[in-house]
Amino acid sequence: MTAERVFIVAKKEFADQVTGWRFLVILALFLAIALAGTYSGVGSYERELDRYAQELATMDDRFDEPGRMTMPAKPPVEGVYSSMFLVLISYGSLLAIAVGFDLVSGEKESRSLKSLLSHPVYRDEIINGKALGGVALLVLVVGGVLLISTALLLVFSFVPSPDDLWMILTYAGITLLLLVTFFSIALAFSTLCRESGSALLLAVVVFILLSSVIPYTTTHIGTALMMEKPDPAAYGGDVFSEGYQTEITAYYEQLNLIASFRNLLSPGMAADNLIQEVRNSLSSGATFEDTLGKIWSSVAALAVYPIVFFAIAYTRFLRMDIR
């Protein structure tokens, strides 16, 4: 395998995707979803700005009173982007599946794959190039959505500060990881199935399982097996007693364990949790160790799923009988 031939295949795949009608549909749907999320985020941001203005007015009224001089923090613009990317996480995975479900099966159906293999190119170079081209397309879509939404926000005088930029890029990176995850799932089924329709159907079934069924089942089984929430009445109503604090700490530790296990099994929940925790760590000033303890399962899910499904696609393609 040579990197030059991998990039040639990736370039061809990327060009075929970008010049096709499907790319325009996917980009339009991504923009529509992003605009819906941006609209929701702008509404929340304006409410936060109103609350900020009220706090400033209250501070001015009490200017001469001692102990009243704490300056309220202006709400960051990155909250608008977090809302946008959370909406993209909810619905964008299906669009990532649309990018990858027929990369291999579609070429088998049109018999163009057999013609491609007649050229001096190895199978591993083809599957790696196709995967790289698909990921490049997703990067283009996420980057385009980010640029267009930023341009619209600038028109309405919502200007991100330098401190907001790295948070916004982090949200975009998390969203891209989720899209790559479901793209790799679709690519794997594209190599496993003879027909594109079957690959699409199975990829959508896996999407439903990972996004809804498994998180719901995991949460309900976990909560049924965990300890009951301690009742303060059992401790004489003293919520600061050592016994109550020990029990309530154990209760929340079990809740966090269930949430971590759920995030580990569901890439969508993992991406959602990552964005929420990254944003909360900024506002609460949490340490890196505390934040890592809450997001380790989410990071693992978004790292393991793409690797596993790409390995399946890679192995299957190398052994595929193309006739």
Image: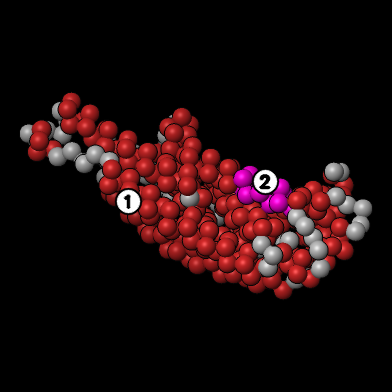
Magenta stretch: dominant secondary structure: helix
> Which color scheme did the rendering employ for the protein?
secondary structure
Q: Residue furthest left?
A: 236
28 relative to 266 in the view: left or right: right
Q: Residue at x 41, y 52 (%)?
A: 215
Q: Residue furthest right?
A: 120
Q: What residue range appears in magenta?
A: 306-317
Q: Residue at x 32, y 37 (%)?
A: 254
Q: How many marks?
A: 2
Residue 66, picture quadrant: top left
Q: Quadrant of the N terminus?
A: top right
Residue 62 percent location from the top left of the image: 26, 45
Q: Residue at x 46, y 29 (%)?
A: 289
**Tag 2: residue type?**
Ala
Give the residue number, with chain letter if any, for mark 2.
311
* Res. 42 in view: no
Q: Which mark is drawn over residue 220?
A: 1
Residue 212 percent location from the top left of the image: 43, 58
- On screen, residue 28 above or below 291: below
Residue 8 percent location from the top left of the image: 86, 54
Query: Quick one: 160 or 203, which is closer to the camera?
Result: 203
Q: Quadrant of the C terminus?
A: bottom right
Residue 236, picture quadrant: top left
